[in-house]
Amino acid sequence: MVDIELDGILRGLRSLNVEECRAALEDSRELLMAGWADRRLLQALIPLTEVENDQVRKDSSWCIGKLAQMKIGDPRSVPSLILLTTDRDEEVRSNAAWALGELAGQSIGDTISIEALNILLTDPDREVKGMAAWALGRMADKMRVTSPSSVPLLEAMLLENSEFLRKGAEWSLERIRRLHPL
């Protein structure tokens, strides 16, 4: 990656023109999927989580999660991601939960993150619920933090018709119970 290309992407991410911003987000996704990352992307992405355009919020939250997966995270992204857990769009909520779980791999997160994820355990969207369960398990596993309020919500998920949700809840409960055996 040539710095000139990155500079162009960063300019696009900071653009007030939604189409320029979306094009820069698409370029960012392609770079991240190819395994290339740069901390400067994260700094430009965080403000985009507050943009009105649904696709911009979807892509920016996904990119923040992918950067965290690549071990480029920043505690300053947590408040924005927590806010996105209440977004009207289910993909944005799912991406936010995923990003919070990936940040846990770098010991980034807090009890407010856990409470936001707990709320998502009751989300009507199956993917959102599953991602929230995974993120809670990841926080317990990687950060060794959890909340007693997560347990009954995850236990309720064990009764879901979806095997995906049941397995996610089991995985998370296993990690939480390692920290707090019965």
Image (tube, grey):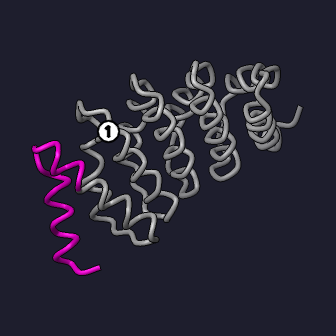
Residue at image location 66% in from the left, 30% down from the top: 147
Q: Is residue 51 left or right of residue 86?
A: left
> Extreme right residue here?
182
Q: Measured from the top left, where is residue 78 in percent x and y?
A: 41, 42
Say if 64 sits above or below 122 in the image: below
Q: Measured from the top left, where is residue 102 in percent x and y?
A: 54, 52
Q: Specify the amino acid type for callout 1.
A: Gln
Q: Is residue 102 left or right of residue 60?
A: right
Quadrant in which residue 12 is drawn: bottom left
> Extreme bottom residue here?
2
Residue at image location 47% in from the left, 28% down from the top: 90
Which residues make up the magenta segment? 1-23
Say if 142 sits above or below 85 in the image: below
Say if 125 sits above or below 61 in the image: above
Residue at image location 24% in from the left, 48% down from the top: 22
**Magenta stretch: residue 11 in it?**
yes
* Prevailing secondary structure of the magenta residues: helix
Q: Quadrant of the N terminus?
A: bottom left
Residue at image location 77% in from the left, 43% down from the top: 175
The front one of 50 and 75 is 50
Label 1, on which residue?
55
